[in-house]
Image (cartoon, rainbow, N blue to C red):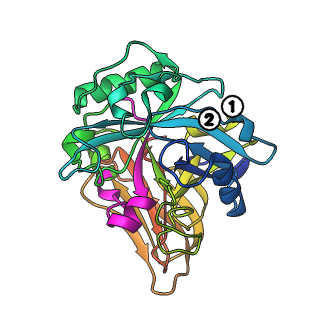
Amino acid sequence: MSRKYLISPEGKFYKAAMHTHSTVSDGRLTPEEVKETYKSMGYSIVAFTDHSRLVCHNDLTDSDFLAINAYEFEVNKGMIGGPGTECYHLNFYAKNPLVDHQVMFDPRNGAWIYSEEEMKTFKIIGEVSKSEHSVEYINKAIKAANENGFLVCYNHPVWSLHTEKDFVPLEGLFAFEIYNHSSQIQEYNGYNPHMYTSLLRAGKSPACFATDDSHMLKAKNLSDPFCDMDGGYIMIKSESLTYESIIDALERRDFYSSTGVEIKELYIEGKNVHIKTSPCTQINLISDTRYAKGVRSLNNDITEAVFSLESDATLFWIICQDEKGRIAATNAASTKI
């Protein structure tokens, strides 16, 4: 019987923070402090996603830490932070550490945080753009990012005041945030699994991300209830901690998202999907059809599950939860081997 691993059995798991901010934009910690703080919490990888500005942090990479160069691309319908303001925020992750340019740049989107002199130093590919809050414009931006060496993640849909009409039509997304820790602890709107399922029901299957979106603006230290570090992360399975190997693992989808639960094994064999985890109270398989499957316990003692894949489902994902409410989530996968 054939077996297809959805997370490779080979390699090592590396803990990765994929949405962080530093003093380059509106974070409180310097890039160096971001690195050291995340390393102290067991992280090997940090993507530096400061607003509207790509800064290469290759100097922070060493034998046990990898900096991923990235930035948060944003298009705001009105003034950021204003009442009723809808916005698109997307993280653009450079697939090559030598990529140092930005695409679809509109200086209005950085004007709230950068001076005109600072923006003159940005490296821009293509003409300066005049952005608009529309599906059509964002699809152009995603296409430009993909063509110029970036993976794209769509961020915090509820915080952005978005509904399915705003993100289901998007094309070329690599990932979709199902958990944003900063949004969750501040506005209680950061956990959005139902929105990810709506993508599956539309035939879309980007990977899913759990992230921090860390700024550390309200927190005095890591024990502060408003600390927005180490709340959401991904665990990447890779042969080595190099830029090329980690990007390859991301593109193979050899990772899962988590707020504290571990996924130890995940594969399809025959018509069944198998998963092994750290202790949970429930494990649920959700498909693009109406019906889901699950196992539950009151004793936080579930460590594995086997689910049959129904013939009428084409896409599925799995969410695991423990007694503390922490979760782990797999990426959307096809029911067909």
Percent from the top left, x then y, of residue 130? 28, 21
Viewer-side residue, 221 vs 286: 221
Q: Residue at x 38, y 12 (%)?
A: 127
Badge 2 marks a residue whose secondary structure is helix
Q: Residue at x 22, y 38 (%)?
A: 77
Viewer-side residue, 130 vs 241: 130
Q: Is residue 277 above or below residue 266?
A: below
Magenta residues, start to end: 171-195
Q: Which image quarter: residue 240? A: top right
Q: What residue is pinned by disc 1?
A: 244
Q: Count neighbours of disc 1 (C-alpha within 10 A) and say few if under 14, some if 14 to 19, many if 20 or more.
A: few
Q: What residue is pinned by disc 2?
A: 247
Give the residue type at disc 1: Glu
Query: Do tag 1 and tag 2 residues touch (Cβ < 8 Å)?
Result: yes
Give the residue type at disc 2: Ile
Examine the structure image and report whether residue 190 is included in the region drawn in magenta.
yes
